[in-house]
Image (cartoon, grey):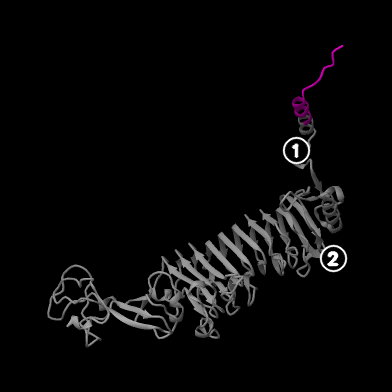
Amino acid sequence: MKTMRMPLCRLLLSLVTVLVLAGVSWAHMYTVNVKDFGAFGDGVTDDTLAIQNAISNAQAMAVSRPSVNTGYHFTAPVVFFPHGVYRVTDSVTIANINLAGEGNALIQMTADNDHSVLDFTTDIFIGTYVWRASISGFTFYGGRHQLYIGNPNIDTGNIRIEKCDFYSSGGVAIHIREGSDSTTLTIRDCKFQGCDQILVNYCMCGFSDSWISTSSTMQHKAVIVNYASLLAENICGVPSVTSDYDQRWIDNYGNVTCRKFRFGGEQAGFTPVVNFATYDYTYPIWPSAVVLDDCDIYACGNHKRKGAVYLEAVPNTIEVNKCRGLIDIPVLNYSPSLDLIAALANAPWYAMHFNISHNSIIAPWITDLPEVMRPYQEGDILGDAQPTTGKWRRGHFIRNRNEAHWYVWTPSATPPSYGSWTQFTNPYPDAKLAPYGWLCTADGTPGTWAPIWYKHETSTQRVSPRPVRPGRESSQQ
């Protein structure tokens, strides 16, 4: 007698059909559901223990094994939170885990004896050994640090926080623990509303596609504190400014790059970046940097630290490029307590890089670097005279910013009808024109300098841009 055998593919298809008809979600077949461990999600019942038990059960099923000639691979089930309001009254400990909320399931930290009173002193999710983790689809409300996680510098660490909303933290919405250096952190598609601070970072962090509305009660601190490496891009920042609270967006102790970051002008805005990181030039080099690229900058509301980049220390790199706004504030400013000459006394030219260019600004003066920083400036260096400070190198050139000195018409001539022409009193009695600029001919502090001249024309034609070499000034007569 022949045995009838159903092909394997048809068998699997039939099994999936039965599960779907029975109301079983394929996505949740391999998840740990917190409601199976006693969580109610009704906003009244204390779900702390049930959530902790579900997470502990999932972590017990996680598998981490060494791979051939490389690091560990890892797999863990998803802890699933159906839509609801989950009240917790104590911290929940997590490690290597995947957490997923349905419809931004709300995790709310409340007082132990009253579900209607928020607790702003207790952390929500905590972990000292969070090496591989994914947290997605939640709303966090209340608590001190809402995510206080990290690891003891374990290689190939990877933490992803996506599609989460953070409301009204008493401390920091996302606090990465110190020492998590070998971890990459991704924060994407999140919203932050009214948190005292939103991020303290001690790892390599990519923060993107998110919205920040700051807390008006934040005092003498920054929305973001970066101690490692931070890339923040496509961020919409809306400040809530309180006068004299010394509020700022980012305190940098490492290297930070902001790209397409809206440093909003609501209530005049506040300082985008305050830098505390000192340049490094000894091996192993850990260079510090502040880069603002293609950002909107409105920052007049913090009168204590006025500027797009405010220096408490000098980093290796400063770049402010293609930014807009910058109304009535300098691109770069520094603390009165920072002695720039002393700070840059030992700075080697090869380790420093400053570039401010292509910004849409109201007044040119706001782009000027302090003179002692200009030897490390990239591109066109403008000035009114040869420098008196700074460590300059042979070949540096400073272009005279005063165009009236090199486009002129003589008092006895009639200016032409085209172009921009200015009559002036010659401030250089030994020459027909002021120099086009100044050339450094020998290294030093401030070095040896020679003026570079344009050849003089005594007619109504434009001055011909033909430089005369140093030492040949007499030919101007």
| Quarter of the view holding residue 166 | bottom right
Is the N terminus in the top left, top right, bottom left or bottom right quadrant?
top right
SS for callout 1: helix
Which residue in the structure is indicated by mark 2?
112
Location of residue 206 with respect to 329 vertically, above or below: above
* Tags 1 and 2 touching, CB below 8 Å: no
From the top left corner, tell me how far across and down residue 308 is, in percent: 50, 72
Location of residue 210 with respect to 453 vertically, above or below: above
Q: Is residue 424 left or right of residue 210?
A: left
Location of residue 438 with respect to 26 vertically, above or below: below
Q: Which mark is residue 387?
A: none
Q: Amino acid at mark 1?
A: Trp
Q: Amino acid at mark 2?
A: Asp
Query: Which residue corresponds to the image point at 83% horizontal and 49% vertical from the top-left?
Result: 61
Q: Classify mark 2: residues with Cα within 10 Å, few (<14), some (14-19) or many (20+).
A: some
Q: Is residue 304 magenta?
A: no
From the top left corner, tell me how far across and down residue 94 is, in percent: 79, 58
From the top left corner, tell me how far across and down residue 18 is, in percent: 79, 30
Q: Which residues are magenta?
A: 1-15
Residue 386 in sight:
no
Which residue in the structure is indicated by mark 1?
26
Distance (Cα) linking label 1 and label 2: 37 Å
